[in-house]
Image (cartoon, rainbow, N blue to C red):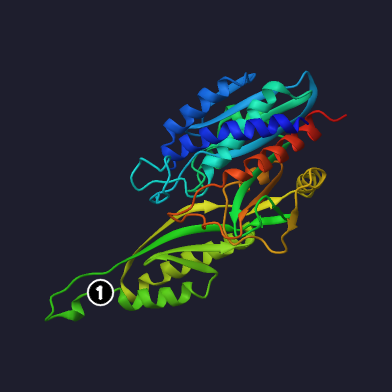
Amino acid sequence: MNRPLLGQIARKTTGLRRELHKYPEIANLEAGTAGIIAKVLEETGPDALLTGIGGYGLAAVYNGSEDGAAVMFRAELDALPVADEIDTGYRSVNEGLGHKCGHDGHMAVLVGLGMYFKEHPPAKGKAILLFQPAEETGEGSKRVIEDARFRELKPDYAFAYHNIPGYEKHAIILREGIFATASRGFIAKLRGKTSHAAHPDQGINPARSMAHLIMKLESLPAEVITAGEYALVTFSDQVMQVLVQEAEHYVKSLEQPSGLKTVFEWTEEFLATENDSTAAGMVKTCATDNGITVIEKKEPFPWSEDFGRFSEQTRAALFGIGAGKEHSELHSPGYDFPDEITETALTLFAAIADRLLNTE
């Protein structure tokens, strides 16, 4: 593995990262972002560059000269509807939108890996760089997997990382098994009936039923999003199905005694992200071999990530890279991706690729 080259590439991709930061696009509207990525990827000479996967997704493929494993590395295209309040020359020009989860940095690392493959192509198998749309809404991975062109790629392994504030900068945060929880958001609407003040008995007031509903939902592992909107959060997809059925049943049960009409809508479905032991072990070995600190997490993270469907399909591992103990929180207006960890992420991805696509 060529460490000096990786350092040069990491510095080179900083400009790209900041360009992406300046022009953020939210889920399902990432056309401009995909265009920027495609243009830079073309210069890396991939054997195939697939666009329009599952929306605005794209994948660059680098083939080895011999048969071997198909290894996928994933980054996310979308930004958030959160204003950018950083005081820099690359502050978002799109009002109310910002790369507040660090996807700009994740994309820059993956492009950097393509630059590395230009100089050091796989000896065997193939490397796949997937830029996934609509991660923040939990829609993108499903559409990507359903795309016939992606199915033809048949990855044997899948890897991704997320920068995580609150942890030592550059440290790898890893866990076998469930790494991030399953979650589903939902909106429950209770429709009553208005009446004249002189005849309150002729109306149907949903207030009492709403109060009962809130109390019931608070007994489930739910997090309040806004009034009337909740997210169910669990460590497994099986438990999630039970909670979904229970929530739907209870909302529906409010209709008969009260005369209310109910409307129930599910949003933002995320499966649990479960790390394969072999893939996670490879991340740990490659990090240790390159002098990178590994923190083995005892419990899953309480947030969700749209990588879970890939972990259902193949041997996959999602890991974290510390953004700094005092770094601004994800999804906050003052957050900015820490460029210092770009080389760490790039080095680890290149080491994984080297182990699976070059080592005898």
- Label 1, on which residue? 204
Q: Is disc 1 surrounded by few (<14), some (14 to 19) or many (20+) residues within 10 Å?
A: some
Q: Residue at x 72, y 41 (%)?
A: 348
Left or right relative to 211: residue 192: left
Left or right relative to 130: residue 120: right
- The vertical placement of 157 against 173, above or below, is above
Q: Which quarter of the figure has residue 297?
A: bottom right
Q: Residue at x 52, y 52 (%)?
A: 269
Q: How many marks?
A: 1
- The vertical placement of 169 against 289, above or below, is below
Q: Three-letter amino acid code at disc 1?
A: Ile
Residue 280 position, x and y percent, is: 76, 48
Disc 1 on helix, strand or loop?
Answer: loop
Residue 181 position, x and y percent, is: 61, 58
Nearer to the camera, 121 or 221: 121
Residue 214 position, x and y percent, is: 42, 74
Left or right relative to 134: residue 315: right
Q: Which quarter of the figure has residue 47?
A: top right
Q: Which quarter of the figure has residue 159?
A: top right
Residue 96 position, x and y percent, is: 35, 48
Nearer to the camera, 324 or 233: 324
**Which residue, as the protein is rendered here, is positioned at the far right?**
360
The N terminus - image quarter: top right
Nearer to the camera, 300 or 14: 14
Q: Residue at x 46, y 70 (%)?
A: 250
